[in-house]
Amino acid sequence: MKFVSLLVTAFLFSLTAQASPSQFDEIKKTGVLHAASEGAFPPFNYFKGKTLEGFEIDLTNEISKRIGVKKVEWKTYAFDSLLIGLGEKRYDLVAASHAITPERAKAVDFLNPYYCSGGVILTKSGGPQTMAALAKKTVAVAVGTTYAQFFDKGKGIEVKTFPKDVDGIQALLSNKVDALMTDKFVVLQLKKEGKLPGLVYSEIIEQERIAIAVHKGEPQLVAALNEGLSKVMSDGTYAKLSQKYFGEDIRCK
């Protein structure tokens, strides 16, 4: 009888699990997708007045259209809190230039990458431009980024974290650190804005694949969003957005 009872319990649990709506079911029902970004990383995500704009914002909106979403509601948070909020199901996805890493993949699920980038070393002219040259030096990184993981502490490299890259740059200009490790596109944007006085940067040290993150264990949502991303990339929309913001196609080669 115990065995029969266990079978009945398992069957009822199975029915309950099947009846429980997925996150994608809820999105389809309401027609609204809740998305989060940082709002402080131009040209990927930034505010123009009170309007949130940028490559990632436009791209996510286009992906959402392809899967039948009527409206995307955006919220912005500090970069280092975005994945925490996703884990708490405060929103459906995060589009904020998160690199795919094994550690992050334990906590969230990633879509297929929508662009590739990588870390570069920013220094004063004549400063260290290679990983080997950073031995026994002090390097700035923005909090919440992956760049602190790049350094071999056995080489005596001291890593200092700052709230944002601009804070690290100020530390570099005032000789409080020897270099800053940050994303290639951060440097290109700062250079475009004339905010790299007397500073130079290296080639990409290590390529990173960047992807939208969703809550762990939502395969229907991942599949739908990946299908939407594929359509955007194949119908010319991605190329247009990439040209608009960067003057080139930045998808992974």
Image (tube, rainbow, N blue to C red):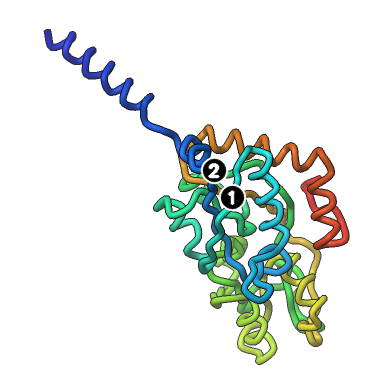
Residue 89: % across, % down? 42, 50
Residue 217: % across, % down? 46, 37
Marks 2 & 1, CB-CB < 8 Å contact = yes
Q: Quick check: 188 left or right of 211?
A: right
Q: Which mark is residue 71?
A: 1
- Residue position for label 2: 31
Q: Look at label 1 and name its amino acid.
A: Lys
Regarding mark 2 in the picture, which secondary structure is present there? loop
Residue 217 seen anywhere in this rendered image of the structure = no
Residue 195: % across, % down? 76, 83
Q: Residue at x 16, y 13 (%)?
A: 5
Q: Residue at x 54, y 76 (%)?
A: 163
Crowd tier of the residue under label 2, counting other residues whose Cα lies within 10 Å: few below 14, some 14–19, many 20 or above: some
Measure the C-alpha gap from mark 2 to mark 1.
6 Å
Q: Which mark is residue 27?
A: none
Query: Dividing the picture into quarters, in which one does residue 117 lie?
Result: bottom right
Q: Look at label 2 and name its amino acid.
A: Gly
Query: Dividing the picture into quarters, in which one does residue 85 lie?
Result: bottom left
Regarding mark 1 in the picture, which secondary structure is present there? strand
Q: Residue at x 50, y 48 (%)?
A: 92
Between 31 and 2, the one nearer to me in the picture: 31
Where, quadrant-wise, is the N terminus in this rendering? top left
Q: Residue at x 54, y 48 (%)?
A: 33
Q: Quick check: 72 left or right of 199?
A: left
Can you say whether 181 is above or below 72 in the image? below
Crowd tier of the residue under label 1, counting other residues whose Cα lies within 10 Å: few below 14, some 14–19, many 20 or above: some
